[in-house]
C-alpha cells in the first residue's frame, strides 16, 4: 500500500528525508521572520460572513457613531450621591478632559465640559441652571457641589426626576449610570456605584475595533487609566472600562498562558517519554519533531496572514498532546520489529507501513474534523481549524519521516561501530527485563480492559441496550445546552477588571433588560421622496412593537427624518436656546415637507438633496446628519440608517426573535422602494452570531462524519471488501459526541467560541482509537481465518450401505455427498479437533488486551496534554481543555468497551455467511 512504498523511500534515503524536513522548517522560520506573528483579538473577529454582519460593519465604517469610554465608580461608603463623592468625580473628570493627550479626541474639543455624562455633572448643571448659568466650566461645577450638602443634592435629584420640564433623556440617564439600589419611586436616593461616560469623536480614533462599531481609542483609554490610577481617591474607587484595556488584558492573559502551558506541556512530554522510552536519544528525536510541527504552524499561519489570539493558544498544546502519540506509536513499533530479529532497515519499512497506515487514517479523519470549521461563516473558527490541521499534518509528517530516519542512521552507525552486535538479541534482553518488571497494576489494567472483550463475547445485546439508553439520555439533555457569545469571557476570573465587569453586569443590569440600539440599514437613492415616505411608514409600523421604546407614544427612532425635523423645530427648555435649530433651514424644510415630517407630493430629489447639502455644510449639524446619512465622494446620498431604541433582554431568545420578525415586517415598505433594507445590530446581531455558531457546529459535525465515513469505508473496502466496517468503527465515537455534549450541560459548560468545535473534534480525535482497535482486530481475523481456511480429506460411512466415502471439507463446512455404491444422498461436516472454533472471541480478547493497553497509554498522554489547558488563565481555554480531555476519555472507553461488541457481531455474521474474503 501507499505507506509501504513511503516507508521504503524513507529507509532508502534517510539523510534526504532529514534534510527535507529541516528545509521545510527553515522555510517556516523564514516566513515568521518575514511576515511576523501578529496578535489581534476583538469582537469584530467573531463577525460571520453574513449580510446582517456586513451591514453592521458598514454602519460602523460609514457613519459617525457614538463613541465613548466608561469609567466605573464604586463608593467606599456605599453612596456616591454625597457631596464629597460627587466632588471627587468632578475633579477626575476635569483632569481627564483637560489632558493634552485626550482633549483632541473629545466629541466637542472646543467645549471639554460638554463631553461628560455623569450623575455629578447632571446635578451640577441643574443647580447652575437655577442660577442662569447655561454653559458652566468644570470649576464652576465643582464649587457648586462643594457648596451643597448631601440632603440638598438628594433633594435636587428628586426635583429633576419629578419635573415635567426635565427631558426624558436626562431622566433615563439616572437609571443607566447609577446602580440598581437607586430607587427614587420608593424614596431610595442612594447608590453604591455609578458610571462616568466620556464622549469621544470617532473620527479621531484608529480603526474600528468592535461589533457595535466601537472605535480604537487605545492611547486615550490608557491615558485615562493612568490618570485614574495616579489620582489620590479618598471616597471612591474608579476603573476605566475601555474596550482596548479589556483587549490588552485578554492578550496579556493569553501570552501568560502560553508562557505557562507550553513549557508545562513539554515537561510533561519529557516525563512521559522518559518513562516509556528509557532512552534520551529517542526522547530527543520525538521532541525535535514536535518542535518542528509547532514551527510549521506559526510559519504557515503567518504566511497565510492569520492573526494569533486566545483561541490559537490551544493549537501548540493540541499538537504536543496528539503529536507525541504518533512518536510513541512509531518508536515502540520500531523496537518491536527489531526485537523480533529483523534488521534496522526492514524494521523501519515495516513500522512505517503498518503503524504509519493507522496513523495516516487517524490524521486524515482528524484533519477533516478541523478543516470542517472552514464551513463556518465565522472566519476565526476557520483559521483555528486550518492551524490545527497544519499542526496535525506536521506532526504526522515529522513523526513518520524524521524520527524513523534519525533512528535508522543512529542505529546503523552504532551497528557499524560494534556498539550493538545483534540488534534483535540486544532488544530481547531489554524485553525480558521489561517483562519481569510487569507489576500488579499492569495486570489489573489488562484484566480491566479485557472486560470489553468479555462483554462483547457474552453480553453483546446488553452492551448495546445500555449504551443506547445512555446515549438517548445524553442527546435529550444536550438540546438544552446554552450557547454564549461574549469576548469578555476570555478575561481571567481573578483579574480586577473581570470583577469590575461582573459588578457592572450585576449592579447595572448591563446584560439585558435595558435600552439598547438596533438598526435598519437602508441602501438606495436616499434623496428619493418615495424612500423617505416609506421610511416614515416603517417607523409608524413600529408603534405596536412591544420591544421598541416609545416617546409620547411614538417609536424612539433616530433617522434622517428626525434630524431634519429637529433642525427645523425651535425647542426651548429652562429658557435655554435650542442650539439644534436654524430659521433658514426651517423655511427650506417647510417648503418641501408636510407637517407630518414627510416629503410633500411636490418634493423632488433635487429639493431633498438641497436639505441634505445644507445639513452637511453646516458645522453644527454635520455630526448629527453623519450619524444617520451617508454621502459618497461623488456627493451621492446612497444609504441611511434607522437607529431604533429597544428594550429587550439579551438572554431572551424568544423576545429577540419577536423583535427581529417585527422589524422585518415593519420595513416591508422599504423593501419595495429601496435597494436593500437590512435589520442588524444589538441583540439581534448577537443572536445571529450565536445561531451561526450552532449551525457551524452542526455543519462541521455532519461534514466530519460524512468525510471520515467515506475515507474509512474506502480503506476497509480496499482491504476487506466491507462497506459497513467504516460505520461500525465510527458508531461508538458518534455516541461520544452525545455523551460529551450531555456532560457539558450537566457541568454547566456552555457552547462558546472554543467549545463549539468539540462535536467535530470528538469525531476527529476519537476515531483514532477506533481505527487502531479495528485495524488490529482485522489483522487477527485475517491470520486466524487463513489458518481455518484449509480443506481436509475426511472419511465418512454411508448410513445405508456402510460404504466408506472420502470427501474434501473445511472445518464447520457442510458438504453434500452421494454414496458411490448405493447412490444415497447425504451431508457431511466435521470439526477440526485441534482448532478453536471461537477464534473470533479469542482475537477480540487479544486485540482489546494488547492494543487496548497501548491505547490506554496513548490516551493518558493526550488527556494529560489537553488537561494542561485547565491551568490556562482564560476560562474558555480551561473549559476547552477539560472537555476535550473528557472527550478523549470517552472515545477511549467507547473504543475498548463498546466497539469490540460491534466488531464481534460483524465478524460472526461474516463467518456465518461464507467466511471472509480477502
Image (spheres, rainbow, N blue to C red):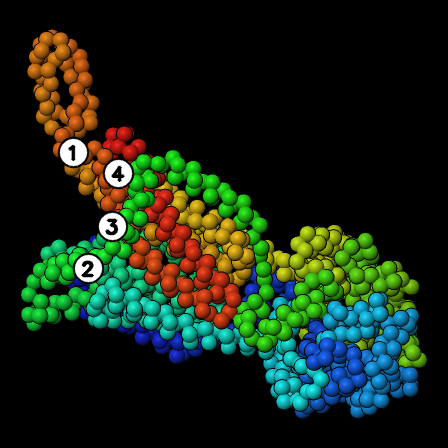
Looking at the rendered image, the disc whose residue lies closer to the viewer, 2 or 4, is 2
Of callouts 2 and 4, which one flags the residue occurring earlier in the amino acid sequence? 2
Look at the picture and state if 601 lies above or below 308. Answer: above
The span from disc 1 to disc 2 (Cα, nearest Å) is 33 Å
Q: Which residue is mark 2?
A: 437
Provide the residue designation for mark 1.
Answer: 835
Image point (88%, 66%), residue name: 592
- Disc 3/disc 4 C-alpha distance (Å): 14 Å
Q: What distance separates the C-alpha of mark 3 from that of mark 1?
A: 22 Å
Mark 3 and mark 1 residues within 8 Å of each other at the beta carbon:
no
Classify mark 3: residues with Cα within 10 Å, few (<14), some (14-19) or many (20+): some
Q: Earlier in the sequence, mark 3 or mark 4?
A: 4
Residue 850's disc is 3
Closer-to-camera residue (370/52): 370
Q: Which residue is mark 4?
A: 841
Q: Position of residue 421 (x, y in %)?
A: 6, 65
Give the SS element for disc 3.
helix
Q: Nearer the viewer, residue 704 or 607?
A: 704
Q: Are marks 4 and 1 in contact (CB under 8 Å)?
A: no
Residue at image position (54%, 47%) is 477
Q: Going from the N terminus, do you reach mark 4 or mark 1 first?
A: 1
Query: Image point 43% across, 49% down: which residue?
Result: 736
- Chain-order first, disc 3 or disc 1: 1
Left or right: where does residue 822 sit relative to residue 505? left
Q: Is residue 399 left or right of residue 527?
A: left
- Of circles 1 and 2, the one toward us is 2
Q: What element does badge 4 sit on? A: helix
On screen, residue 74 above or below 760? below
Amino acid at each position: 500500500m501507499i505507506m509501504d512504498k513511503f516507508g521504503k523511500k524513507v529507509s532508502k534515503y534517510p539523510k534526504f528525508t532529514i534534510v527535507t524536513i529541516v528545509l521545510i522548517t527553515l522555510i517556516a522560520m523564514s516566513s515568521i521572520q518575514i511576515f511576523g506573528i501578529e496578535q489581534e483579538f476583538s469582537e469584530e473577529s467573531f463577525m460571520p460572513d453574513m449580510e446582517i454582519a456586513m451591514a453592521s460593519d458598514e454602519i460602523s465604517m460609514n457613519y459617525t457613531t457614538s463613541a465613548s469610554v466608561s469609567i466605573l465608580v464604586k463608593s467606599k461608603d456605599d453612596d456616591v450621591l454625597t457631596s464629597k463623592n460627587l466632588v471627587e468625580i468632578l475633579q477626575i473628570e476635569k483632569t481627564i478632559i483637560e489632558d493634552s493627550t485626550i482633549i483632541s479626541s473629545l466629541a466637542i474639543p472646543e467645549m471639554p465640559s460638554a463631553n461628560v455624562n455623569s450623575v455629578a455633572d447632571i446635578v451640577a448643571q441643574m443647580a447652575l441652571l437655577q442660577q442662569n448659568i447655561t454653559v458652566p466650566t468644570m470649576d464652576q461645577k465643582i464649587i457648586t457641589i462643594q457648596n451643597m450638602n448631601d440632603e440638598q443634592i438628594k433633594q435636587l435629584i428628586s426635583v429633576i426626576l419629578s419635573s415635567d420640564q426635565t427631558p426624558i433623556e436626562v431622566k433615563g440617564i439616572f437609571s443607566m449610570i447609577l446602580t440598581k439600589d437607586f430607587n427614587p419611586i420608593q424614596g431610595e436616593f442612594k447608590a453604591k456605584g455609578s458610571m462616568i461616560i466620556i464622549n469621544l469623536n470617532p473620527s479621531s480614533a484608529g480603526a474600528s475595533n468592535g461589533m457595535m462599531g466601537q472605535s480604537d481609542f487605545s492611547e486615550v483609554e490608557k491615558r485615562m487609566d493612568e490618570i485614574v490610577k495616579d489620582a489620590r481617591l479618598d471616597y471612591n474607587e474608579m476603573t476605566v472600562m475601555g474596550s482596548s484595556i479589556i483587549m490588552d488584558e485578554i492578550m496579556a492573559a493569553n501570552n501568560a498562558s502560553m508562557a505557562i502551558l507550553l513549557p508545562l506541556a513539554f515537561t510533561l512530554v519529557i516525563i512521559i517519554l522518559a518513562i516509556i522510552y528509557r532512552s534520551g536519544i529517542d526522547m530527543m528525536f520525538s521532541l525535535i519533531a514536535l518542535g518542528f510541527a509547532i514551527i510549521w504552524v506559526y510559519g504557515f499561519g503567518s504566511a497565510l496572514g492569520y492573526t494569533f489570539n486566545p483561541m490559537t493558544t490551544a493549537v501548540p498544546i493540541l499538537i504536543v498532546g496528539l503529536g507525541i502519540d504518533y512518536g510513541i506509536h512509531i518508536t515502540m513499533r520500531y523496537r518491536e520489529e527489531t526485537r523480533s530479529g529483523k534488521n534496522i532497515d526492514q524494521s523501519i519499512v515495516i513500522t512505517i507501513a503498518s503503524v504509519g497506515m493507522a496513523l495516516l487514517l487517524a490524521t486524515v479523519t482528524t484533519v477533516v474534523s478541523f478543516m470542517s470549521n472552514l464551513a463556518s461563516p465565522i472566519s476565526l473558527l476557520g483559521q483555528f481549524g486550518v492551524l490545527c490541521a497544519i499542526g496535525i499534518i506536521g506532526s504526522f509528517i515529522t513523526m513518520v519521516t524524521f524520527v524513523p530516519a534519525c533512528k535508522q542512521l543512529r542505529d546503523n552507525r552504532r551497528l557499524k561501530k560494534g556498539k550493538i552486535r545483534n540488534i534483535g538479541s540486544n532488544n530481547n534482553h531489554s524485553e525480558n527485563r521489561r517483562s519481569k518488571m510487569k507489576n500488579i497494576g499492569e495486570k489489573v489494567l489488562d484484566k480491566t480492559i479485557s472486560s470489553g472483550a468479555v462483554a462483547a463475547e457474552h453480553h453483546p445485546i446488553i452492551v448495546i441496550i445500555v449504551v443506547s439508553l445512555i446515549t438517548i439520555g445524553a442527546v435529550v439533555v444536550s438540546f438544552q445546552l446554552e450557547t454564549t457569545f461574549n469576548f469578555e469571557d476570555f478575561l481571567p476570573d481573578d483579574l480586577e477588571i473581570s470583577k469590575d465587569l461582573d459588578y457592572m453586569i450585576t449592579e447595572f443590569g448591563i446584560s439585558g433588560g435595558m435600552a439598547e440600539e438596533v438598526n435598519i440599514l437602508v441602501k438606495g437613492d436616499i434623496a428619493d421622496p418615495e424612500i423617505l415616505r416609506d421610511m416614515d411608514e416603517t417607523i409608524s409600523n413600529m408603534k405596536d412593537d412591544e420591544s421598541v421604546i416609545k416617546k409620547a407614544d411614538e417609536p424612539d427612532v433616530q433617522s434622517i427624518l428626525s434630524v431634519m425635523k429637529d433642525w427645523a423645530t425651535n425647542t426651548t427648555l429652562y429658557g435655554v436656546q435650542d442650539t439644534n435649530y436654524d430659521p433658514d433651514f426651517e423655511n427650506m424644510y417647510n417648503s418641501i415637507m408636510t407637517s407630518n415630517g414627510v416629503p410633500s407630493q411636490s418634493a423632488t430629489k433635487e429639493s431633498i438633496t438641497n436639505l441634505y447639502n445644507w445639513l452637511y455644510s453646516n458645522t453644527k449639524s454635520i455630526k448629527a446628519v453623519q450619524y444617520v446619512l451617508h454621502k459618497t465622494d461623488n456627493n451621492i446620498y446612497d444609504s441611511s440608517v434607522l437607529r431604533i431604541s429597544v428594550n429587550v433582554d439579551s438572554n431572551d431568545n424568544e423576545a429577540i426573535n419577536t423583535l427581529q420578525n417585527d422589524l422585518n415586517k415593519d420595513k416591508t415598505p422599504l423593501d419595495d422602494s429601496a435597494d436593500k433594507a437590512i435589520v442588524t445590530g444589538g441583540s439581534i446581531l448577537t443572536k445571529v452570531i450565536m445561531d451561526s455558531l450552532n449551525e457551524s457546529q452542526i455543519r462541521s459535525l455532519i461534514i466530519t462524519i460524512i468525510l471520515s465515513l467515506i475515507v474509512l469505508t474506502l480503506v476497509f473496502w480496499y482491504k476487506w471488501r466491507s462497506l459497513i466496517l467504516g460505520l461500525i468503527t465510527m458508531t461508538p465515537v458518534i455516541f461520544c459526541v452525545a455523551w460529551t455534549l450531555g456532560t457539558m450541560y450537566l457541568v454547566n459548560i456552555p457552547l462558546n467560541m472554543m467549545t463549539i468545535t468539540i462535536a467535530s473534534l470528538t469525531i476527529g480525535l476519537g476515531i483514532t482509537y477506533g481505527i487502531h482497535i479495528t485495524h488490529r482486530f482485522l489483522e487477527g481475523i485475517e491470520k486466524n481465518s487463513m489458518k481455518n481456511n484449509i480443506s481436509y480429506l475426511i472419511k465418512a460411512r454411508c448410513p445405508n450401505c456402510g460404504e466408506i466415502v472420502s470427501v474434501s471439507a473445511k472445518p464447520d463446512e457442510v458438504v453434500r455427498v452421494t454414496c458411490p455404491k448405493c447412490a444415497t444422498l447425504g451431508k457431511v461436516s466435521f470439526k477440526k479437533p485441534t482448532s478453536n472454533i471461537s477464534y473470533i472471541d479469542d482475537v477480540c480478547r487479544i486485540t482489546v488486551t494488547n492494543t487496548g493497553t497501548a491505547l490506554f497509554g496513548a490516551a493518558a498522554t493526550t488527556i494529560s496534554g489537553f488537561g494542561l489547558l485547565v491551568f490556562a488563565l482564560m476560562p474558555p481555554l480551561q473549559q476547552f481543555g477539560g472537555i476535550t480531555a473528557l472527550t478523549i476519555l470517552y472515545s477511549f472507553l467507547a473504543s475498548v468497551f463498546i466497539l469490540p461488541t460491534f466488531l464481534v457481531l460483524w465478524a460472526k455474521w461474516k463467518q456465518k455467511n461464507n467466511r471472509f474474503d480477502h
